Amino acid sequence: MNIMQDNTQLSVKEIIKQNESSKGRKRLSRWIAVLGLLFIVAVVGAVWNPRGSANIMSFRTRPVQFGDLVITVTATGNLEATNQVEVGSELSGIITSMTADYNDTVEADQPLAYLDSSKYEAAVMKSRAEVASARANYKEALATRKADRKTLKRYRKTRELTKGKLPSLEALEQAEAELERSTAAVAAAKAAIDIAEASLKSNEADLKKTVIYSPISGIVLSRDVEPGQTVAASLEAPVLYTLAEDLRHMELQVDVDEADVGLVKEGQSATFTVDAYPDRTFEAQITQVRYGAETTDGVVTYKTVLRVENPELLLRPGMTATANIIVQKVEKTLLVPNTALRFTPQRPEQGKKESRGLLSSLMPGPPHRRESKKNAGEGEPPPGMNGKQPSVWILKDNRPFPVPVQKGATDGVLTAVTSRDIQEGTGVIVNAIRTSN
């Protein structure tokens, strides 16, 4: 009986040992699987970003230039004739003939067109007859006044000789009234002459206006009517021709943006181009900067007028031009690219942080001392940069080195600077390129 109990206890112990051994093997298998997975991840991380790889920083530089810096303001506008005149007709009538056509050169007081003058000639003849009639009436009035004056004088003499008996007082008063009426008639007749002469003068002026003359010497830009066409002058004079004065002298009217108008002044020089001659540059000079603002689609501009010389008659009214107005010129100065003034080298810790492998990113360890120091000093400007003093960076022993400069004017691409530590040809860093080794 005891032997059976011993055997039973022994078998139970063996079963427990076997179970414990089986559990241990399972845990071992799980650990082996985890370690295998980590090994695979480490291999992949090493292939993707090897621990032994290093980032190499290379720098792109551009040489400092020495020369003149020209600052310009760009504006667009149109060419116009210095004096452009629309020639019209003050009278209504039929155009009988025209003597000028497009592009013809005309002189001042040259006949350009003729209106049918028959109606106006008749008006002149009528006015002349009215003047003659008025003058005849005036002479008649003078004769009547002279006769009335003699009659009154005789009545007075007779009354004096007869001591008031003849003529009667009534007859004497009637003679005095007749003289006053004849005197008034003379004045009226004289006024009638003035009216008739004024009417004659007006009709003669209208007759002269049937011939339309050129008011200026210039060139015909357009002709808006044809012979035989009827023009009607009512509230506005119908336009027959558009003339431009000497096109050898023109003006360019451009719209300067409100942000730039403070830099633009009279007397400044400019250059401009037109689409008709894209490879040629023309010169101009500002003669007027107008105070009146013009607003188009919410954009405020100011009209600026430039004088243009056109001796070859290449430029024509209406051409669209793009002008570059020279608002400032700095001569004989050091010029650095604006990208060099904006460049700031990256600190080494940033490169190290980026070179961490995949495995280390998956299983981060405790922060390194250097990283802690970097984080403590994060936000501080690089050596040589105090946040206020502008600097450029040059290479010394293949490392960036800051050089303080004083900035001057800029054209958006280059900036004039002064510095004792750089000179013409010095390479300034404009960009940094990181490559893996």
Image (cartoon, helix red, strand yellow):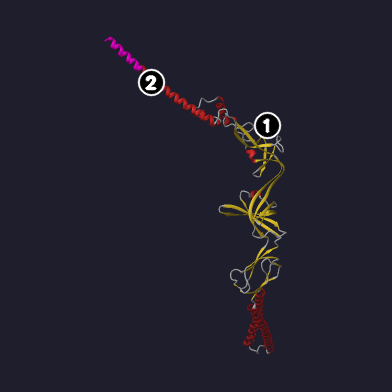
The residue labelled by disc 1 is: 396
Residue at position x 69%, y 63% from top? Answer: 245
Q: Nearer the viewer, residue 425 or 113?
A: 425
Say above or below: 68 vs 84: above
Q: What residue type is disc 1 on?
A: Lys
For label 1, the crowd category at 10 Å Cα-Cα, with few meaning under 14, some 14 to 19 and many 20 or more, is: few
Secondary structure state at the residue bearing disc 2: helix
The residue labelled by disc 2 is: 22
Secondary structure state at the residue bearing disc 1: strand
Q: Main secondary structure of the magenta part?
A: helix
Q: Which residues are magenta?
A: 1-16
Q: Quadrant of the C terminus?
A: top right
Q: What residue type is disc 2 on?
A: Ser
Residue 230 image point, x, y percent: 60, 73
- Among the two numbered marks 1 and 2 on one chain, the one whose residue lies closer to the N terminus: 2
- Residue 308 position by quadrant: bottom right
Q: Quadrant of the N terminus?
A: top left
Depth-wise, is mark 1 or mark 2 nearer the camera?
2
- Residue 158 position by quadrant: bottom right
Residue at position x 36%, y 16% from top? Answer: 17
The answer to if 7 sits in the magenta stretch is yes
